[in-house]
Every structure is written in C-alpha cells, then in structure tokens.
Amino acid sequence: MNLDRRRLLESAAAVGAASLAPRLAFADAPAGPPVATVRPVTETLHGVTVTDPYRWMETPSDPEWKPYLMGQNAYARSVLAKIPHREDLQAKIGHVSGLVAAVNALQPAGGLIFTEIRPAGANTFKLYVRDGLGGQDRLLFDPDTLATAGSHYSLDYWFASPDGRFVAIGSSPAGSENSVLRFLETASGKMLPEALDRAQWGAVSWTPDGQSVFLNRLKEGTKHGDPDHYLDSVCWLHRLNTDPEMDVKVLAKGMYPDVPMNDIDTPVVFAQVGSDSAFGVVQSGVQNEIRLYISPLGAAMAGKPVWTPVCGLEDAVVGAALMDHGIYLLSHKDASRYRIVKTTEAHPAFAGGADAVAQGPGVLKAIGTARDGLYVQSLEAGLGQVFRLTATGERTELKLPYPGTVSTLATDPLADGCWFLLESWVKPAVLCRGGPDGVVTLTDIIPKPSIDVSGYESHEVQVTARDGTLVPLSIISAKGTPKNGHAPLYLQAYGSYGLDIDPAFGPRVLPWLDLGGVYAVAHVRGGGELGEDWHKAGQKLTKPNTWHDCIDCAEYLIHEGWTSRAKLAVEGTSAGGIMIGRFLTERPELLAVAIVRVGDSNALRFQFMEAGPANIPEFGSILDEDGFKGLREMDALSHVKDGAKYPAILLTTGVNDPRVAPWEPGKFTARLQAATGSGKPVILRVETDAGHGIGSTRKQRDDETGDTYAFILWQTGDPRFQPGA
C-alpha cells in the first residue's frame, strides 16, 4: 500500500488542451466576437450585494449558450489564423516535442516492468511491459485503438496486479475523464469481458491474490455537468471475470457509524501483498489530509469490514505505506516540511506512533515500500533527493548522477530498490533505478532525445515580496540572452492545493527560447515547494499572496532587465486562473498579455459546478462569511472594471472539461470584451475534443502552444509575427 493523496491531485495541474477543429479560411472569419446577452442576477450574500451579468451561461441547455461558445471559438481561430508564421511555429514545436519519449508512470510487478510511455513521434501515451530491465518493450494497450472519427481516447490510469498477470486500465474519450475500467491479461494482451463505468480518478487497488480490486465508482445515474456529479461515491470490491452487478459494497457514506462521511468524501480501500489488512481511506474532496482506518482484509473483501481508526484530519496525514507490519504515515502535523510517523498494524493509532523520520531541511514528498525498505522522496532548494529507510531505522542516501528534480517514485513490495525520473529545466528526463546500496543506474527505458541542450541555462533566484517573504523564481533562457529589457518573457505561476511546479524539461519551451524569449516560473504561495506553511499562506483568506507574489516576481524581472512591461506575458492554468485573473484585474498596466488556460475566474460561483463542492476545503464556501470574503477577493469576474485598459488576453476552455466548467471562461471573456478600453484583443479558444487538458494529445498541446506563442509575439511587437509583415 503506497498511498499518496497529493499524487492524485497532481493531474489537476496537468494542462494543454487543444483543438481538432478545422482551420477557418479568412473569408469565413467573423468580423468580431459574439456579444453575450446580459441577464443580471442580483443577490445579497452576508450583507453584500453581488450581481452576476451572465448567470444564464451556467445552464448548458440555454439556447444561447452553444452558439455563443462556438462563436467565440470561431472568432478566436480567425484572429489567430491571421498571425504570420504561426503555423511554422506550430510545426517547429511539433518537431521538437516529437523527438522526446515521455514517461508518465512506471510499476514493477512480478518481475515485469510496466511503463506508460508516449514514444518519440507518437501522439498519445500507451502502456508497455518488458521482462526485467534487459527485456524488450511490448505494447499492451494503445488508446488509439478505441478512437472514433473526430474524437481521441486517453489512457487515464492503470495498475498491474502484484504478480503482474493482469492490469486494471481506465480510459476515456475526448478528454472527458469519464473513465471506464477494464482488465487486461498481460501474457495474451486480451481484455476480460467486464467493463465498469463511472470509474474516475484511478482509485483502484489490487487484493494480494491478484484476483480482485477495490475501486471507487461514482453513484449510479450521475452524468457530466451535474452539480452533484462527484458526490456520494462508493468503494466496491470487484472480482475478475464476474458481473459488476455482483460487486460487494465495502465503504460508503452512512454504512458505518464509526466512519462518518460527508457527501464530498471519496471512500477508497487499499491492500498490499504480504499483509492481512485492508486500509480504508476517506478523502475530503481535494483536501490533502486524509482519514485512515484499518480492517482485517478478509472481512473487507466480504463486505463486512471492522474499521479501527489510524488517523484523523487533525493528524495531518497525506500519505501512507506499509512495511513489515509497520504503518508509515507522512504527516505535516507540527512539521511544515513533513515527518514520517510509524505505528503498527497491531497498534495503529497515530497518537501512539513515533517519528521514523523527523522533519529536516527538505520537504518530504512521497514514500513507497520495497522489499528492502521504505524509499522516501524529498525536495530541498528545488533539488530532489531519495533515501532508503529500513525497518530498523537504518538510512541510506541514494547518490544521484547529477542535481535535478525527482518524480514518479515507484516501488514493488516484492522486489528490492526503487525507480524514479530525474530531470531539470535544461536536462531531458531519464528513468533511474535506485539499488539498496544507494547506487543509481541510468536506464535506457527512455531513449535520449537528439536535442542539443548545451545552449540553454537556468537560474534560481529569491524575490523579496512586498511583505518581506522570499519567493523562489526560476528563469530559463538561451545562454547569452541580454538583460536589456527587450526579450519577451513568459511567466507562469500556479499556487494551489500545495502542488509544486518543480524543474522539469519541457521541449515546447525551446522554440520560445530560440526566438529570443525567456521563460520563468514563480513558485508562489499556495503551492507546496516549501512545505505546508507555504501552502496555507496562499489559501482561502490568505489567497491574495498568490497573485501578489507573482506580481512582485514580474516587477523583479522587469527591474533586472529580463523583460519590460511591453514584453511581459503571464499565464495561469486551472486554479492558476485565480492568480492570473486577479493579476490582470489588479495590475493591468504591468503586462502586455494574459493567458488564462482553462482557468477559474468566477470563484463566487465555483462551488455550483460539478467539481465545485470537492474544492471547498481548498478555497472555501460562500455559505459562511469568511468563505464568502475570501472567494469574493479571488473572483476575477467581479473585479473587472468598465473602461479599464486591459492587456491582450487569450482564454481557453474545453467543451468536456469536468474540472473548470466552460461557463467560467465564457463569462470572463464576455465581461472583459464588454469592459476593456484598451482596444486590445480578448479571445476565447475552445476545444471541442478535449476537456481540462488531461489526456490531450501531443498534437493538441503542440498546436495550442504555437497559438499561444504567436499571440504573445504578435502583441509584444515581434516584427516577424505582425499581420501584413
């Protein structure tokens, strides 16, 4: 059992939706964007009057909604199509991204190595297996075989059984994340007959015998777009080769008085080979902290678990692992950078545990059980580390071949060692194997791309924010880029859920740098780069720190000559839409371009879309006064001012987005277009075969990146990208 609550959330930061819509000829281009009808809805919340001019957009069946959304897309495509060299730039981005083989996940099981890889030149991630490190990869599952005309399929998640005989696979169409769970036999590559729908999020765990899985399913009858879509889900036990109607209910709201649950809670059960215990996990929406219970495995499989508490929310546990009947709990209780508390299956309570690893200078990020010990991933000053901890407390540091970011830690309870990815801003990822002796081997599972990275460099600096806090800032550029204020600069920030933007090699950034651009990442408060205190300092009532940190980093970059106001573009994606939405409404004169990618911009209405209730633990609820106060400050839509001179703005959305409903960017686009006094373009790029960006194809990401770069270069005055040039 290697449970990592934060890893389940990281997919929320995965981005890059793009379109398969046909290109518009200039003759078909609309003269302007559609003007949205204003139908104001006014309400009083905690004594404050709030007016929403576009509440009608929240109703997908409204006859004006689809024409408005598609009209915005047609206009955006026509504007982008007029930018010279845009298609050439997309082709360059596609070429360099196609040189890289990307690994999304790895699992050793039964002497086999399973990998989720997008091979060089491929468009989607696929599942492969090889017999040991020296074996040859064999294709097990290709989502392209499920694709239909005009719509692609994605591999959402997968888990091999402990003996490697079977693989549980979740896949979905068009970026919807509406996963259907199927089971594949490794030896033959054949699918078993059953298919289980409503199996989102990848909350699947095999039983030790490899013949059954615990899985979470959404309630029957729910559908995409329902405000209660993710509420009241249920954990079941499914036995292979049986009718899902015969599945055994194991954990759900109201089943056990000693396991209280709310409607936003997600119940999950995990088991591990070598243990006779089952672990029940209650996840409260997007909240990182979990409640954990233990039961005899046989009782849980029979649908009659006897739950004993391990930890509650007050214990601040975000991950767990089992080794030699010891339960290892990753917690930030009294330890912002995390510690590991050890209890036992016989005496599981957190309160009776002791520190197996005390808080240190680095932030502990993940733990995993191997036969020879517990492997621990940490982050310090932007650099990854891994060490092994034995059951007797002996610690062995793994010797990394070069400084970089560690991610995707993978272990097998039946085998020694660990696996992980190592990379940096300017070094492509390599898949490493760490041995019990601390020696790290660079494997050939990811071929080295034929990309010369010697001409690029990165800088890590600390920016003093307005309140004196030091904010980490990463800057990536071509070597020798002059600091004369003339370079276009692409600044990104996120700052939510305690998630990091760690140094990672992004091939799509290289064409931007080759054009003379600079790329920067502000590691703002609300993220997890510096531990839980950093997260809490950008959450709910402290959320303004998130966009203020980014604003302060932008001013630093301008002051240091990396760019100028006329050359600065700032991007926020998903929950990062709060950051960029409030940046551009608070300091519109500071930047030339704002990129709002599938972004939250209407925080006051966020809890009323399908993913909204689950996000209350992170952002708050308008139903209580402090929650309303915080959300009102985050709400970019209500901070738009008529006549303000806003920068050029590119917004994006996906028709099938289950995380940020398209009406959020739809509303924000309409309000900005009606209000701006600058005359600069405000466009909404819509994806018809995508959702939040999770599961988007490589070409979709390439094309969107090309559109984004071209839009920025046009609006920052690059002569090569000016219409008529």
Image: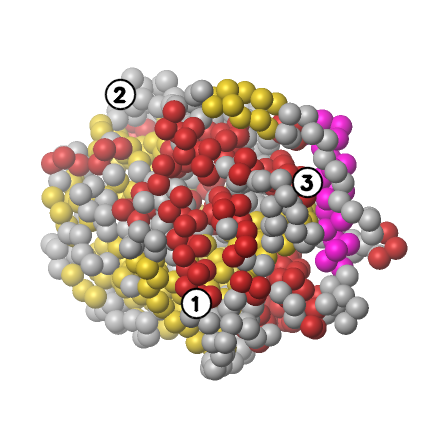
Q: Secondary structure at mark 3?
A: helix
Q: Amino acid at mark 2?
A: Asp
Q: Which residue is mark 3?
A: 674
Q: Residue at x 19, y 47 (%)?
A: 335
- Which residue shows up at 50% across the image and 20% down it? 44
Q: Is residue 137 found left or right of 384 in the rendered image?
A: right
Q: Three-letter amino acid code at disc 1?
A: His
Q: Residues within 10 Å of mark 1 (few under 14, many from 20)?
A: few
Q: Are marks 3 and 2 in contact (CB under 8 Å)?
A: no
Residue 306, picture quadrant? top left
Quarter of the rendering containing residue 225: top right
Quarter of the image with the N terminus is top left
**Image coords of residue 222 (percent x, y):** 57, 26
Q: Is residue 653 above or below residue 100?
A: above
The mark closer to the camera, 3 or 2, is 3
As drawn, 428 above or below 117: below
**Residue 559, disc:** 1
* Kind of residue at badge 3: Ala
Q: Which numbered disc, 3 or 1, marks the residue that appears first in the sequence?
A: 1
What residue is shown at x 54% (from left), y 58% (from top)?
591
Q: Is residue 468 left or right of residue 63?
A: left
The answer to if 61 sits in the magenta stretch is yes
Q: Dot 2: what SS?
A: loop
Q: Point out which mark residue 258 bears.
A: 2
324 or 477: nearer the eye?
477
* Residue furthest to the right: 27
Say how many tags the image has.
Answer: 3
Magenta part of the chain: 59-81
Q: Is residue 238 left or right of residue 80?
A: left
Which badge, 3 or 2, comes first in the chain's sequence?
Answer: 2
